[in-house]
Amino acid sequence: MPSVMGLLEERERAARQRVDVLQAELREAEAAWERFVIARETVAEVLAEPCGGKEVPPVVVAGGRPARVVGAVAGSVVPVWREGLGAAVLAPDYQQLVDVLAGGSGSGVGAMDCRQLAVAVGLEPVPAKVEGVRSKVEGVRSKVKRLAARGWLAEERPGMFSAVAGRGDGS
């Protein structure tokens, strides 16, 4: 019959080996995570830079509507607003929110809350606590908060957002 000390030492060795394996896996996972963070930050910087310092005219397609800018796709990074940067660099859903707050024609509609914005872009204003349904209002809230944090919109008071003159039209 093995001794109690021998059993404890055996289990200690096994636990130490497991810790070593997990630490190696953790180091690999952290290295992969750091690469993704660096890649995302690099892409955000590139997307935020103007094209060679020159304004690129929008491509017009049939019907007179400007074509979507390459890179302005759903899930793309929202760049920090700076002079000369137009809403065309934003993903379509972000462009739509900026356009609604700008009044579509630059006339401005004043401040709106997230529920009003959700309705204005054609979403059902589902409350956040409905079981099994992802709130459309919460999605709008996260988008306008991101736009406000990056200078595209103003948050006049908590939860009330408005357009900033010249921020959505590239002027």
Image: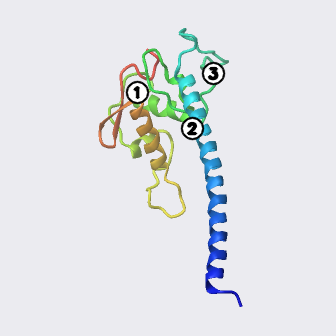
* In-image side of 24 versus 126 (left or right): right
Q: Residue at x 62, y 38 (%)?
A: 35
Q: Is residue 57 above or below residue 150?
A: above
Mark number for residue 67? 3
Location of mark 1 (residue): 102
Residue 124 image label: none
- What's the residue at 63%, 15% (across, down)? 59
Rendered image coloring scheme:
rainbow
Q: How far apart are marks 3 and 1 (CA)?
A: 20 Å
Give above or below for 65 relative to 158: above
Whether residues under marks 2 and 3 lie with C-beta atoms below 8 angstroms apart, the answer is no
The reply, left or right, for residue 150 in relation to residue 122 is: left
Q: Residues within 10 Å of mark 1 (few under 14, many from 20)?
A: many
Q: Hey, what amino acid is under mark 1?
A: Ala
Residue 121: in sight, yes or no? yes
As drawn, the residue found furthest toward the top would be 54
> Residue lying farthest bottom?
1
Q: What element carries label 1?
A: helix
First in sequence, mark 2 or 1: give its number: 2
Of residue 68 and residue 40, the one placed in the foreground of this image is 40
Q: Where in the figure is residue 71, as x and y percent of width and height?
A: 62, 27
| Label annotation for residue 37 | 2
Secondary structure beneath dot 3 equals loop
**Residue 71 located left or right of residue 87:** right
Spatial separation of the CA atoms under disc 2 and disc 1: 33 Å
> SS class of the residue under badge 2?
helix
Callout 2–callout 1 Cβ contact below 8 Å: no
